[in-house]
Image (spheres, rainbow, N blue to C red):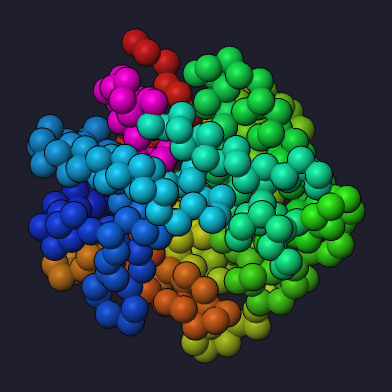
Amino acid sequence: MWQQAIEDALRVTKRNITRFGDRFPHVSTGDEHYTLNDNTEWTAGFWSGILWLCSEYSEDPVYREQALSTVRSFRRRMDQKIIFDHHDIGFMYSLSSKAQWIIERDEGARQLTLEAADMLMKRWREGPGLIQAWGREGDAVNGGRIIIDCLLNLPLLLWAHEQTGNDAYRRVAELHALKSRRFLVRGDDSSYHTFYFDPMTGDAIRGGTHQGYRDGSTWTRGQAWGIYGFALISRYLKSPEMLETAKRLGRYFVAHLPEDGVAYWDFDVPVEPGTKRDSSASAIAACGLLEIAAQLETDDPERLFFQEAGEAAVRALAEHYSTHGNEQAEGLLEHGAYSARSGDSPDDYTIWGDYYYLEALMRLERGIPGYWYERPVL
């Protein structure tokens, strides 16, 4: 099944190279076509990551050539400083230039990725002790705000620490991860999407949401970011506490899935005819569950649980949510939700959902874990 699903992804991606040209897919909007941009969205790195994964799997040079083109675009984006008023720099550069470094050991790609890490470091606010998620420094609403998505951007800083030996990268990543663990993870193992702090003192104010059903609900994609993010941070920091947090969030996610194994857009939204799913949340969670399993010893009784849960998530996506057989499809997964709460692409393709689905497939078929951490050089 995994091989067939990857072959499907290769075919869709090759068609999309011609369709997209030098532009970047974001989400679809009620049809089978992605909206495209000139590398201005936070999601641009996921297209680059898909191309690198396809290049690793296939000997066809068309994937590598287009992947290299996207890295050149990210070089221009850095030089022109296009829209860096958010924390999603790790999403963009981990899957583009860092991917090239991991695969090809290209020194220019490494240097570009270190520049990206430095750009993310500029969002650190020493007073409240956090990486500001959105907006410029001093923003009245967002100046002391964190969101759970940032956990997937922290590996960029931890990688930069490994590359340079500069402890500042690790310090910032670890402090932000600890704050996220304390305030975003609830006692019942669910999670807040976002949390507000006083931007001057760092005093905790309240938890909330931006894309979830309500402030006290559990937005499923946020829970998935937490599973995978804490697992990756655990790998870098060799932290049993971070791994246990990932496991807690993972168990909650699995326990609250509907019968077909793919999450609704929020775990607390009333389920009725027409309630939207979020296939991208299940794809992200699958990667996180498989990452947890990879860090556990073979005789650990929980290893089988997380491995089987990850495989079950990918199987559910492949069997019931993939675009297999649709020759016009531009996406790999149907029924992803960008923001069901606001009606922004609530039931569409999402390029991050496609990326994580393919990454999970590559983990299962080839043992290739994506580009969040350095691989041993053989």
Q: Is residue 100 magenta?
A: yes
**Is 189 situated left or right of 283 in this image?**
right
Please report the residue visible at 40 percent of the width from the left and 60 percent of the height from the top: 41
Q: Is residue 189 visible?
A: no
Query: How far from the left and from the top, in percent, is residue 291?
Result: 53, 36
Please report the residue visible at 84 percent of the width from the left and 57 percent of the height from the top: 198
Q: Is residue 255 magenta?
A: no
The image quadrant of residue 231 is top right
Q: Nearer the viewer, residue 18 or 235?
A: 18
Query: How far from the left and from the top, in percent, is residue 59?
Result: 12, 32
Q: Is residue 358 above or below residue 135?
A: above
The image quadrant of residue 334 is bottom left
What is the magenta segment's predominant secondary structure? Answer: helix
Query: How far from the left and from the top, in percent, is residue 192?
Result: 73, 61
Please report the residue visible at 60 percent of the width from the left and 60 percent of the height from the top: 135
**Is 270 situated left or right of 312 in this image?**
right
Q: Is residue 84 visible?
A: yes
**Is 218 situated left or right of 309 in this image?**
right
Q: In which quadrant will I find the C terminus?
A: top left
Which residue is most to the bottom? 273
Q: Nearer the viewer, residue 79 or 340?
A: 79
Total labels drawn: 0
- In the image, the segment drawn in magenta is 93-111
The image quadrant of residue 370 is top left
Please report the residue visible at 66 percent of the width from the left and 77 percent of the height from the top: 213
Query: How far from the left and from the top, in percent, is residue 37?
Result: 29, 64
